[in-house]
Amino acid sequence: MLMIRAIIRPEKSDLVLKALFEAGYVAVTKIPVVGRGKQRGIKIGDVTYDELPKELLIIVVKDEDKDFAVSTIIEAARSKPEGAYGDGKIFISPVEEAYTISRGASEL
């Protein structure tokens, strides 16, 4: 299994969640976060905004579902067809173990 963490624009959160739900990925964790990417924030006039609001979405998928889940997120999260700086980033990590607390049982 793989954990997919997507950091996206807050205004795209509902669209991405809807796309994931429609694609069959109903279990999602959503966390408001702040940060900046390679562009080092946004400068407007004399003011630099270093910490920009984003949403962190976390899902766990089977290895074979990775490409479909990632493309679903990318298509829903892009701010325009070709994308733009600040649209976000996706990170993928292996999940070695997972447990359901109520049952105390392993999910893998």
Image (cartoon, grey):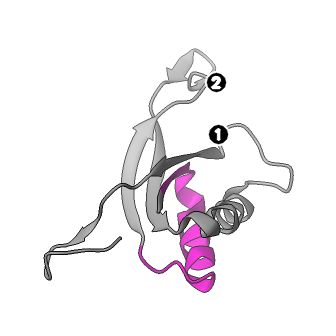
At label 2, which amino acid type do we have? Gln
Point out residue 49 in the picture as x, y percentages from the top left corner.
50, 26
**What is the number of the mark on residue 75?**
none
Q: Secondary structure at mark 1?
A: loop
- For the residues labelled 1 and 2, the Cα–Cα distance comes to 8 Å
Q: Is 31 contained in the magenta span? A: no
| Residue appearing at x 45%, y 65% in the figure | 60
| Vertical placement of residue 68 versus 87, above or below | below
Q: Secondary structure at mark 2?
A: loop
Point out residue 33 in the picture as x, y percentages from the top left corner.
39, 45
Q: Is 25 contained in the magenta span? A: yes
Residue highlighted by disc 1: 86
Point out residue 52 in the picture as x, y percentages from the top left corner.
49, 37
Q: Are marks 1 and 2 in contact (CB under 8 Å)?
A: yes
**Which residues are drawn in magenta?**
3-27
In the figure, is residue 48 to the left or right of 106?
A: right
In the figure, is residue 75 to the left or right of 73?
A: right
Q: State the residue in front, 106 or 83.
A: 106
| Vertical placement of residue 49 versus 23, above or below | above
What is the count of numbered marks?
2
